[in-house]
């Protein structure tokens, strides 16, 4: 097997057990780390052993085993997640109203668009008139 992460240093000479050795329990790896028992490590003195204190700041482990998962149970969303979902829904609702032209901004945009269209139509009509006038001058000059 591989020697581990630090190959060049003398401290990096790691010996790993094979899966077969681990199953058999005949690993040659020295056991230097001791498993600490949670109850033996945190012994409570006096009334603390009797009274269980509910600390709201205490972070409880959220690890759940796969066999203990309840599929039908719905999970509660956090405040941030709820606010994010509400924000997205409000934006979608606003965009739908915007497309239908029911919002104030959409009305202003449509008015501005109508004004621009009218200005362009007037400019096109004026160009046509000028072009027609030029043609008339050319035809009169030829006669």
Image (tube, rainbow, N blue to C red):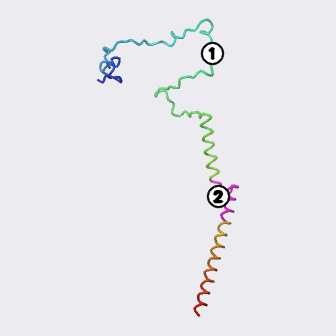
Residue identifier under label 1: 53
* Quarter of the rendering containing residue 31: top left
* Quarter of the rendering containing residue 115: bottom right
Is residue 87 depicted above or below 46 in this figure? below
Q: Look at the image and give the residue range highlighted in magenta.
A: 96-114
**How far across and down, in percent of the image, does residue 142 sit?**
57, 91
Magenta: predominant secondary structure element?
helix
**Is residue 107 located in the magenta-colored stretch of the structure?**
yes
**How far across and down, in percent of the image, does residue 72 sit?**
53, 34
**How far across and down, in percent of the image, does residue 113 sit?**
65, 63
Q: Is residue 82 left or right of residue 26?
A: right
Closer to us: 43 or 28:
28
Name the residue located 60 percent from the left edge and 40 percent from the top edge. Answer: 84
> What distance separates the C-alpha of mark 1 from that of mark 2?
57 Å
In the image, farthest residue toward the top: 46
Q: Earlier in the sequence, mark 1 or mark 2?
A: 1
Q: Is residue 50 left or right of residue 30?
A: right
Closer to us: 17 or 48:
17
Instruction: Assess disc 1: are there few (<14), some (14-19) or many (≥20) residues with their C-alpha within 10 Å of its C-alpha.
Output: few
């Amino acid at each position: 097997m591989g020697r581990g992460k630090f190959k060049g240093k003398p401290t990096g000479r790691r010996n790993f057990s094979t899966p077969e050795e681990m199953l058999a329990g005949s690993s040659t790896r020295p056991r230097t780390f001791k498993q600490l028992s949670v109850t033996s490590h945190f012994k409570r003195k006096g009334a603390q052993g009797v009274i269980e204190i509910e600390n709201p700041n205490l972070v409880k482990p959220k690890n759940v085993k796969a066999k203990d998962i309840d599929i039908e149970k719905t999970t509660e969303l956090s405040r941030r997640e709820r606010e994010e979902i509400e924000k997205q829904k409000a934006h979608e609702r606003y965009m739908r109203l915007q497309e239908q032209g029911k919002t104030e901004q959409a009305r202003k945009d449509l008015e501005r668009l109508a004004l621009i269209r009218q200005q362009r139509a007037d400019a096109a009509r004026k160009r046509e008139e000028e072009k027609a006038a030029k043609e008339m001058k050319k035809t009169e000059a030829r006669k």
